Amino acid sequence: MTELRDRHPDLPEVGRAVLLPGRAYSPAKPLLAAVSDVLLRRGWAVREVWWQVPDGLSPRRTVTWVADQARTATAGWADRPLIVGKSLGTLAAPYAAKGRLDAVWLTPLLLDRRVVRAIRANEARQLVIAGTGDTLAWDPDAAGRLEADLLALPGADHALAVKGDKERTAAYLSQVRAAVDDWLG
């Protein structure tokens, strides 16, 4: 089951974005909420995707399912939306590459060759934000080969947090906001 929630900026709209969450990381969680706030403040309308990932999907079927969710979320919302994906949502990288869509990838699954190939193949602008302590997704070699702007946060985990260090975690969230804001131009 997937729910789409639209948020609109208080100022004139400059574009539209689609937020694709992680498996257990909803748009209400800190990273996606922070990026959404930056987008709204900059005049972007935001479509949040709230999904329940079906049990038992094979890895290949999961990629197809995420692409279908992205396709459904963009239909009738925008022809060329900015894609923002967190973790599982980064499996939409092939969809974004095919459509040459600008994208912000939060903790992309760099251990998955399909994700890395798609990010490298996408001719649009992309921002990759990852933590070097992320044992679920970080691959320094793959990160170094990406054709994207990259913010690698030392020691940050899959939530871009540093366990036991609230100050550094808060500072990293501020860096994420600033990086997205700067990248938007």
Image (cartoon, rainbow, N blue to C red):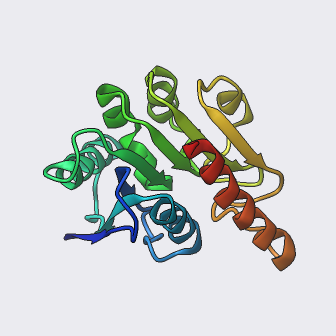
Closest to the observer, 77 or 71: 77
Q: From the viewer's perspective, is 154 left or right of 24?
A: right
Closest to the observer, 27 or 87: 27
Q: Quadrant of residue 6?
A: bottom left
**Outermost residue, left side:** 76
- What residue is rendered at 65% in x and 29% in y? 142
Q: From the viewer's perspective, is 142 left or right of 53?
A: right
Q: Position of residue 157 (x, y in %)?
A: 71, 61
Split into 4 quadrants, where in the image is the C terminus?
A: top right
Whether residue 51 is visible to the viewer of this picture, yes or no, is no
Q: Quadrant of residue 56?
A: bottom left
Q: From the viewer's perspective, is 9 left or right of 157?
A: left
Q: Position of residue 163 (x, y in %)?
A: 80, 73
Whether residue 82 is visible to the viewer of this picture, yes or no, is yes
Closest to the observer, 58 or 37: 37
Q: How many marks on residues? A: 0
- What residue is rendered at 31% in x and 40% in y? 60
**Height in image: 123 above or below 179?**
above
**Height in image: 46 above or below 163?**
above
Split into 4 quadrants, where in the image is the N terminus?
A: bottom left
Closest to the observer, 137 or 73: 73
Q: From the viewer's perspective, is 86 left or right of 111?
A: left
- What residue is rendered at 65% in x and 23% in y? 145
Q: Position of residue 4 (x, y in %)?
A: 24, 68
- What residue is rendered at 48% in x and 25% in y? 117
Q: Position of residue 82 (x, y in %)?
A: 39, 45
**Outermost residue, front side:** 12
